Image (spheres, rainbow, N blue to C red):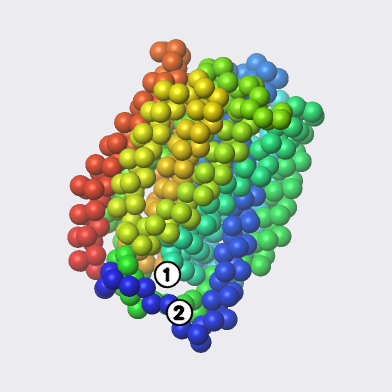
Amino acid sequence: MSTTTVDRPSTQLSVSNYERWWHLALCVLCMIMIANLQYGWSVFVLPLQQAHHWSVANIQIAFTIFVALETWATPADGWIADHLGARIGPRIVMGAGGILVAVGWLIDSYAASLSMLYLGGTLSGLGAGAVYCTAVGTAAKWFADHRGLAVGCVAGGFGAGAALTIIPIRMTIEAHGYASAFLWFGLLQGGIVLVASQFIRNPNPGEAPTVAKTKVPQTTRSYTSREVLGSQVFWVLYVVDLLMCAGGLVVTAYLAPIAASYHVTNMTMFLSVTTLSLALVFANVMNGIARPFFGWVSDNIGLHQTMAIAFALGAAAYYLLSAVGHNPWGFVFFTGMVFFCWGEIFSLFPAMCTDLFGPEYATTNASLLYTAKGAAGFLVPLGAFVVAATGNWNNVLYIAAAINAAAVFLVWFVLRPAAARHHLED
C-alpha cells in the first residue's frame, strides 16, 4: 500500500469512465429529491403546531423517527443492493425508496393525529434511507481514485438539495397550507426518484477504473459486515460520527425556533426575502458545497487532517452563531458556516469506511456506520428540554461547540492511531 500519488484510469477504461459519471449524476439527482425530508422539515414545525396545537417536542418525535429509520434500516437496504447484483440491486432499492418517500409525505399531508404524523415519518425515513445508502454505495464503488470527491458530490446533493425548493415550499405553505406542500412536493420528489433510479447500476467486477497508488491508505481486501462489526477502528469511527451528527441535527431540527428566539425570523433582508428563508437557503447551499469540497481536500491531504480542521472550524461557528445570531446577517452567515463545517461528515465518514474495509460490501458497511446518525437523532428532542429548563437557546449551541472540540481530540489521538493499526494488520 502506498500513500504518495494517484494513478489516472487507463484509456481502455474510458467508456466506463464516462458511464460512471452518468451514474454519479443520477445518484446526485436522487439525493436532491430527498433532501427536503430532512432539511426542509423545520419550516413545517410551527405550522403543524398552530394547526393542531401539538407541542414542538411531540412534533419533533416525528423527525426523530424519520432520522432513526432513515439510518437504522439502511444496513438491510445495503445488503439487498449488494446481493441482488450490480444492475438490479440499486434499481430495486432506490425505486422502492422513491415510492415510500411519496407515500410518507402524502400521509403527513392528511395527518390529523400525532400517530399518523409518526407513520408518515416512518415511511419517509425508510424511503430516504434506501435512496441515501444506495447512492453513497454506488459512488464509492465507481470511484476508488476520487472516493472522497465522489461520495461528497452524492452527499452534497442531499445537503444542498433543499436550497432549490425551500422557498417554494414556504410560499406554498403560506398560500395553500402545509398539507398542500407535503402532498405536492412529496409526489414530485418521490416520482423523480422512482424514474431516475431505474437507470442507475453498480460496476461489474473489474469494470470500474482502478488505481495502483493513492494519496490516502486503502485496504487491499473487502471486509464482510461481520468482520467490520468486530473491528475496533469501526467503533471508534462510529462514536466520532455519532457525536458530530448530534450537534448538526439539533440545529437542523430547531433552526426556525432558534430564529424566532432571536427575533429575526421575518426580518426582510432584501426584496421580500426574510432572514429565515435566506438562512435556510444559504445553510443548505453551504451544506452541499462542504461535502464535495472537503471530500476533495481529504483526497489530497488525508481524512484525519481534514476532519480535524473541519471540526475545529465547526466549534467556532456554533459559538459565533450564539454570539451574533441576534443580528440578521450574523444569523444567516454563521448558520451557513455551521452547516458548512457539519455537512462534510457525510462525505468523509463513508469514504473512510470504504478505505478501511474495501468496496465489495461498501453499501452495507457504510450503512452500518450511517446508523450513528439515527442514534444521534434521539438526542434531538433534548434540545427542546434544555431550552425549557434554561430558557436559552445559547446553551444548546455551547454544547454543540464543545462536542466539536472533543471530536477534534478524538480524531487526532484515538481514530488516527486506530486506523494506522488497522492498515498495518491488513
Q: What residue type is labelled 1?
A: Ala
For the point 45% across and 36% down, which residue is it?
Answer: 338
Q: Residue furthest right?
A: 176
65 left or right, relative to 299: right
**Residue 117, quarter of the rendered image:** top right
Q: Gap between marks 1 and 2, in whole Å?
A: 10 Å
For the point 53% across and 48% down, which residue is it?
Answer: 288
For label 2, the crowd category at 10 Å Cα-Cα, with few meaning under 14, some 14 to 19 and many 20 or more, is: some
Residue 25: x and y, percent?
60, 63
Q: Mark 1 points at which residue?
A: 144
Question: Where, quadrant-wise, is the N terminus in this rendering?
Answer: bottom left
377 left or right, relative to 34: left
Question: Where, quadrant-wise, is the C terminus in this rendering?
Answer: bottom left
Q: Which of marks 1 and 2 is nearer the N terminus?
A: 2
Q: For residue 9, which numbered disc appears in the image?
A: 2
Residue 340: x and y, percent?
46, 43
Q: What residue type is labelled 2?
A: Pro
